[in-house]
Image (cartoon, grey):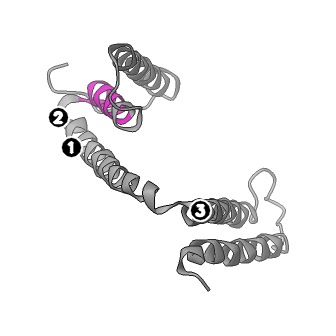
């Protein structure tokens, strides 16, 4: 067996096990109080998530197996992006208490779109990223504060 198909084989085995797990979850007995959310719901959600992830593993494994040696140079860029994404997330967590949810979310969303978008990004793209970041952060802030009545972290200078 070729080493490059390892993810495909593991994904197939995991998919088969998740299908068996899902089928067995239907044998869980429901009680009288199980109306909307029953005893089966959590195991079935877990089974579906495992199945979806195993399909992603299979698809990713097939794509990696088809990759040629000339395309392998692009892997270094993906490692850099991964490090930038994780660093941006760490900064977001650190800054949330310092500058509040709204401002830190705008910075976080903008940085994520800039890192994951086409590079180098033009002025129009950067402006669009900024507008989307502000709109999404504002919408989430209004939704959580006014609809769900949950308090989000605020900066000391607000």
Comes first in the chain, label 3 or label 2: 3
- Residue at disc 1, secondary structure: helix
> Going by the image, does 48 lie left or right of 84?
right
Q: Which numbered marker is on residue 94? A: 1
The residue at which mark 2 appears reads as 98
* Disc 1 from disc 3: Cα separation: 40 Å
Pointer 3: residues within 10 angstroms few (<14), some, or many (20+)?
A: few
Depth check: 73 or 111 in front?
A: 73
Would you say the residues marked 2 and 1 are in contact, meaning their CB atoms lie under 8 Å apart?
A: yes
Q: Residue at x 49, y 24 (%)?
A: 143
The residue positioned 31% from the left and 32% from the top of the image is 111
For residue 28, which numbered disc appears in the image?
none
Q: Which residue position is annotated with label 3?
A: 66
- Quadrant containing the C terminus in the rendered view: top left
Q: Position of residue 51 (x, y in %)?
A: 69, 64
Q: Main secondary structure of the magenta part?
A: helix
> Which quadrant would residue 138 be assigned to in this image?
top left
Dot 2: element: helix
Q: Please name whichever residue, 128 or 149, is drawn nearer the observer in this view of the structure.
A: 128
Residue 144: x, y in percent?
A: 46, 28
Q: Is residue 124 left or right of residue 147?
A: left
Give the crowd class for mark 1: few <14, some 14-19, many >=20 residues within 10 Å.
few
Q: Is residue 39 left or right of residue 158?
A: right
Which residue is pictured at 32% across the width and 25% down the height? 106
The image shows residue 127, relative to residue 119, as above or below, that is: above
Q: Which residues are magenta?
A: 100-112
Residue that protrudes farthest toward the front in the picture: 70
């Amino acid at each position: 067996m070729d080493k490059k198909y390892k993810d495909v084989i593991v994904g197939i085995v995991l998919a088969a096990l998740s299908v068996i797990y899902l089928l067995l979850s239907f044998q869980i007995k429901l009680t009288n109080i199980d109306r909307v959310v029953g005893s089966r719901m959590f195991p079935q959600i877990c089974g579906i998530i495992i199945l979806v992830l195993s399909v992603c593993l299979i698809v990713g494994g097939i794509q990696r197996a088809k990759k040629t040696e000339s395309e392998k140079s692009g892997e270094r860029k993906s490692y850099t992006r991964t490090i930038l994404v994780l660093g941006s997330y760490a900064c977001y967590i650190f800054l949330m208490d310092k500058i509040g949810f709204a401002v830190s979310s705008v910075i976080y969303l903008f940085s994520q779109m800039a890192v994951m978008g086409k590079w180098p990004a033009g002025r129009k793209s950067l402006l669009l990223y900024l507008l989307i970041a502000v709109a999404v952060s504002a919408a989430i802030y209004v939704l959580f504060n006014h609809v769900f009545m949950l308090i989000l972290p605020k900066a000391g200078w607000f």
